[in-house]
Amino acid sequence: MSMHVGGDNKGPLVDMNVTPLIDVLLVLIITFMVVTNLTPRGLDAIAPQSRKNEAKTPAGDTTIVVSIDSARRVMINTTPVDINALGSQLDDIFKTRNERIIFVKGDPLARWRELLISPKALTSIR
């Protein structure tokens, strides 16, 4: 800090010397700029690779759509299935799969009560 004594009758004037504060500020900015470039951006992860000799299922075979029309005819994808054998058919399909996702498509013109499937048909699905 410096002190300036003026010739006027106002008394002494005090001016703060901000040069050291600006120097400290510039050193901090440079420090943060250097440190942020040295910090790691994320975690290293090893992604699983597919095996080349492993049999791949086509994209169309992975989706299971059970459709029911207004006449209570049941189809798995495009294959007609007896409504009483639906549970065993789905159980056979999902024995070799890890994903157990089923899409159910009902006829928009049918009434809800007509589309209900008996619980006996779905007992083996888990």
Image: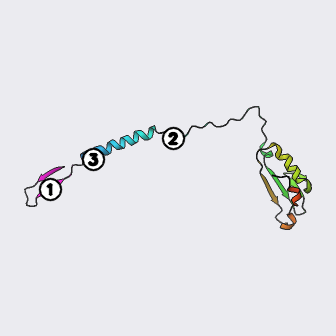
Magenta residue span: 1-18
First of labels 1, 3 by sequence position = 1
Name the amino acid, label 3. Answer: Leu
Q: Residues within 10 Å of mark 3 (few under 14, many from 20)?
A: few
Q: Is residue 69 left or right of residue 15?
A: right
Q: CA distance from mark 2 to mark 1?
A: 51 Å
Where is residue 122? Give x, y as percent.
Answer: 85, 56
**Residue in view at x 86 percent, y 63 percent:** 115
Disc 1 element: strand
Q: Residues within 10 Å of mark 2 (few under 14, many from 20)?
A: few
Q: Do the CB atoms of the residues marked 2 and 1 lie less than 8 Å apart?
A: no
Q: Is residue 55 left or right of residue 2?
A: right
Q: Residues within 10 Å of mark 1 (few under 14, many from 20)?
A: few
**Residue in view at x 76 percent, y 31 percent:** 53
Q: Is residue 35 magenta?
A: no
Question: Which residue is the extreme one toward the top?
Answer: 53
For residue 13, which numbered disc appears in the image?
A: 1
Name the one closer to the observer, 109 or 34: 34
Name the amino acid, label 2. Answer: Arg
**Residue in view at x 79 percent, y 36 percent:** 55
Q: Do the CB atoms of the residues marked 2 and 3 lie less than 8 Å apart?
A: no
Kindly identify which residue carries mark 3.
21
Kindly identify which residue carries mark 2.
41
Name the amino acid, label 1. Answer: Leu
Disc 2 element: loop
Q: Is residue 2 magenta?
A: yes
